[in-house]
Amino acid sequence: MVAGWALWQAPAPVRILVLLVSAVAVGTSVGTAFLFPVTTTDLTRFAILAVCAVIAIELTRHIERRRVYGHSSSVAYIDTKAVWSFAAVIVLPPVFATLMVVLTYVLSWTRVQHERPGGLVYRWTFSGATVLCGTQAAVAVLALGMHSYPGAPATAGLDGLADLGIIVLAATLRWGLNVALIMAAIALSKPNIQARELFSNFGEQMLEAGAMGLGLVAAAIVVANPFVMPGIVIAMVALHRGILVNQYQQASRTDAKTGLSTAGWWHDFAEQALVRARDHGSTLGLLIVDLDHFKRLNDTFGHPHGDRVLKAVAEELIAEIRNEDACGRWGGEEFVVVLPDVGDRTNLRNVAERIRRRIQSVVVEPPAHLTQTGDATVTASVGGAVFPSPAINSLDELLLAADTALYAAKNAGRNTVRLSGADQPAGPSQQPLPHRAEPPSATS
């Protein structure tokens, strides 16, 4: 039975990391378990937190299942179990803090995670082990720094501020260990993963920060007035519904095949950017990027290979543009790049040239049995236009001008750049614009 565990099919570095972290988690949990005596009050507080955790997980499990099914295995999964386990770290002896982590992870697995496609037990166990390691580190910080540990922070003057600072330090250490170990495991299991993909959902860590903040509130309430604890549960349910709405919004504006913006979203973004450019007297650049002979590539090497090419090109586009820009898929093998405040035509041409060269450098190996059947080189033709320009007063006219320039690039032999209006040979590329970290908000 042990020989059949999925862990043994994982890469050797992953196996070593999982086993090492699990051993450290067990060892440190046992080591801190008996550092502080357990009282009847501790048992009561643990029971209250445990009941609230069970109710919250049960009430939010359908929402969590939807989140889990939409989660990428290339990024860390974030939820709100930390509300209960971090509250336990603050007000309960270490043995109960450890038990709360185990309880919430077991509940989450049995009620949510076990139905996830590819939801391997060892991954969830490893995730729990990282939290246990962080929990024991937090216990050490709290025990050494708080005026009265375990217990709520002091309420008087500087003592209260000092305790709050210690709690923030403990929370940061707990979070940092968890995230670092999870990302290390993902990187070891996917050696070719790019850093920007690994950190692509780093903004969701605010959810973890919010959970720990609620955990601090729960810790204070369970000590002062446990009858108010249902309010924390209600807040948890409301928080989860807000998270799900945000996830659906993100999914609705993201192209599943490339990870870029959908046509509807980038069109709305471009409309708003054009209005701002008109109001502020600034410029707006627009590029249409079309992959050359993409149908032939699909026919020769198959659609799965074509999909990998689209994804690779999308990554190059994201790497080239700035935070304030937007990049989307128009359809098929065509992409659109929207560049607010681009400056003049020379700047737009330089961006277009760098994009063209990036795409030309893309290497996606075709299936081994098809390597001799044709040329797998990827190139692109790029057409662009700038607002304001003569006869360009709307987004439709800007798109038409860029599309016309794209056809000129195609007719000029492909793998080239053309801009609307009078065109000149491409000049030397300047330094790249700052890389974009995330898609800009549609309301920015």
Image (cartoon, rainbow, N blue to C red):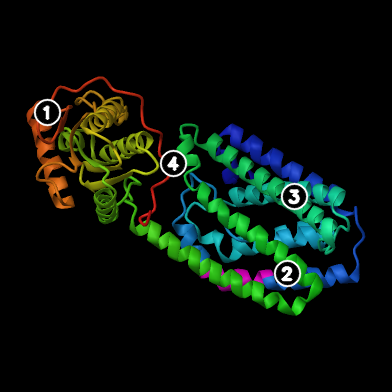
Q: Distance between the residues labelled 3 and 2?
A: 21 Å
Residue at label 3?
170
Looking at the image, is mark 3 or mark 1 nearer the viewer? 1
Q: Mark 2 points at which residue?
A: 50
Q: Nearer the viewer, residue 247 or 392?
A: 392
The residue tagged 4 is 437
Between circles 2 and 4, the one closer to the viewer is: 4
Q: What is the secondary structure assignment of the residue under circle 3?
A: helix
User: Which is nearer the N-term, disc 1 or disc 2?
Assistant: 2
Residue 73 is situated, as x and y percent measured from the top left of the image, at 49, 47
Q: Does the image show residue 129?
A: no
Q: Give how far apart the Cα atoms at labels 2 and 4 are.
A: 39 Å
Asked if the residues shown at circle 1 and circle 2 are in contact, with their CB atoms under 8 angstroms apart, the answer is no
- Image spot of residue 143 (x, y percent): 86, 51
The residues bearing labels 3 and 1 have C-alpha atoms spaced at a distance of 60 Å
Q: How crowded is mark 3: few (under 14 residues within 10 Å), some or many (20 or more)?
A: many
| Number of the label disc, if any, that sits on residue 25 | none
Examine the structure image and report whether residue 55 is included in the region drawn in magenta: yes
**Mark in the foreground, 1 or 2:** 1
The residue that mark 1 highlights is 423
Q: Which amino acid type is marked by label 3?
A: Ala
